Image (cartoon, grey):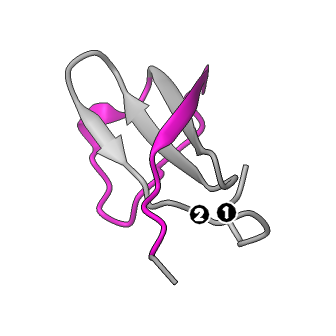
Amino acid sequence: MTRHRHRSTRTDTRPFTGPVSRRENRAAHGCVTLVHTCRCGAHRRENVNGRHVEMGPWVEPGERGAP
């Protein structure tokens, strides 16, 4: 079986709600959170403010932290 590599096929823009990564980047907080969705249903959140980025991990459907 080949290993699936997540790629974003859809991106939704949502209001900022808080940190998305264990390696928090406070400079990226305060604007919007982008929610990237893979074709398999996994989600990844990314905080952006036009200059700084904080990227969270991919979360499989049904796992804790899924939107």
The disc placed on residue 65 is 1
- From the top left corner, tell me how far across and down residue 40 is, in percent: 66, 55
Say above or below: 40 vs 16: below
Point out the residue furthest to the right here: 62
How many residues crowd mark 1 within 10 Å: few (<14), some (14–19), many (20+)?
some
Q: Main secondary structure of the magenta part?
A: loop
Which residue corresponds to the image point at 53% horizontal and 44% vertical from the top-left? 18
- From the top left corner, tell me how far across and down residue 43 is, in percent: 60, 50
Q: Viewed as shown, does residue 22 lie left or right of 63?
A: left
Which residue corresponds to the image point at 63% horizontal and 46% vertical from the top-left? 39
Q: Give the range drawn in magenta.
A: 3-30
Going by the numbered disc 1, the residue's amino acid type is Gly
Q: Distance between the residues labelled 2 and 1?
A: 7 Å
Say above or below: 17 vs 1: above
- Mark 2 or mark 1, which is nearer to you? 2
Which of the two labelled residues, at mark 2 and mark 1, occupies the earlier sequence position?
A: 2
Proximity of marks 2 and 1: CB atoms separated by less than 8 Å: yes
Going by the numbered disc 2, the residue's amino acid type is Val
